[in-house]
Amino acid sequence: MKILTNSFDVNTTAGNQLIDITEKIRKAVSDTGITNGSAIIYCPHTTAAITINENADPDVVHDILLTLSEIIPRRRTGYRHGEGNSDAHVKSSLVGCSETVTITDGKLQLGVWQGIYFCEFDGPRKRTVHIQITGQ
């Protein structure tokens, strides 16, 4: 069994943004030569996240961001965290900091409409994504 790690930077351009990183993950898997196993995609930031969702219709990204902003607004009162980005911390916790995808015959086992997204909730910033690929 092999365990290989990789990482790459993501430069975000907005306060709240979903960036499709599927192709970067596919390339990382391909570069390892691992044909059967799993890939863990991890975000080491407390105001960002990783998710899997539809990547065929850009309106889905819009709708996700709209809904998160409606249920977790950026407000000036009530939150105690001094940086003023408590909404970003809550969004990150709800969405989650990692996803695991199985690899079969050298390919990520994503559904037809699925993509892997880096979720920015406190941008713009330079962020990092870590990947751990395990298998044979």
Image (cartoon, rainbow, N blue to C red):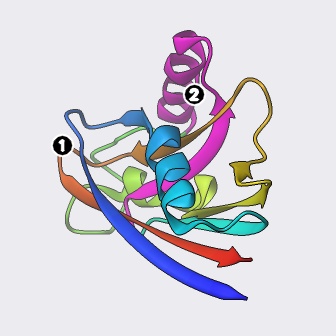
Q: Position of residue 86 (x, y in %)?
A: 36, 58
Which SS class for mark 1? loop
Label 2 sits on a secondary structure element that is helix
Please tell me whether residue 103 belongs to the stretch shown in magenta: no
Q: Is residue 51 above or below residue 130?
A: above
Q: Nearer the viewer, residue 12 or 75?
A: 12
Residue at the (53%, 68%) spot, across then down = 32
- Left or right of 46? Residue 54 is right
Q: Which mark is residue 124?
A: 1
Tally of numbered tags: 2
Tell me if I can see residue 63 in this picture: yes
Q: Residue at x 60, y 52 (%)?
A: 95
Residue 120 falls in which quadrant of the image? top left
Judge left or right: residue 56 versus residue 17.
Answer: right
Left or right: residue 18 versus residue 74 is right
Closest to the observer, 16 or 42: 42
Quick one: quadrant of the C terminus?
A: bottom right
Q: Circle 2 is placed at which residue position?
A: 64
Classed neighbour count for the residue bearing mark 2: other residues with Cα under 10 Å, few (<14), some (14–19), many (≥20): some
Query: Residue 110: image x %, image y %?
Result: 75, 41
Percent across and percent down for residue 80 are 33, 68
Extent of the magenta region: 46-71
Q: Amino acid at mark 2?
A: Ile
Name which residue type carries label 1: Pro
Label drawn at residue 67: none
Q: Residues within 10 Å of mark 1 (few under 14, many from 20)?
A: some
Residue 91 seen in the current view: no
Marks 2 and 1 close (CB-CB < 8 Å):
no
The answer to which of 47 and 99 lies nearer the viewer is 99
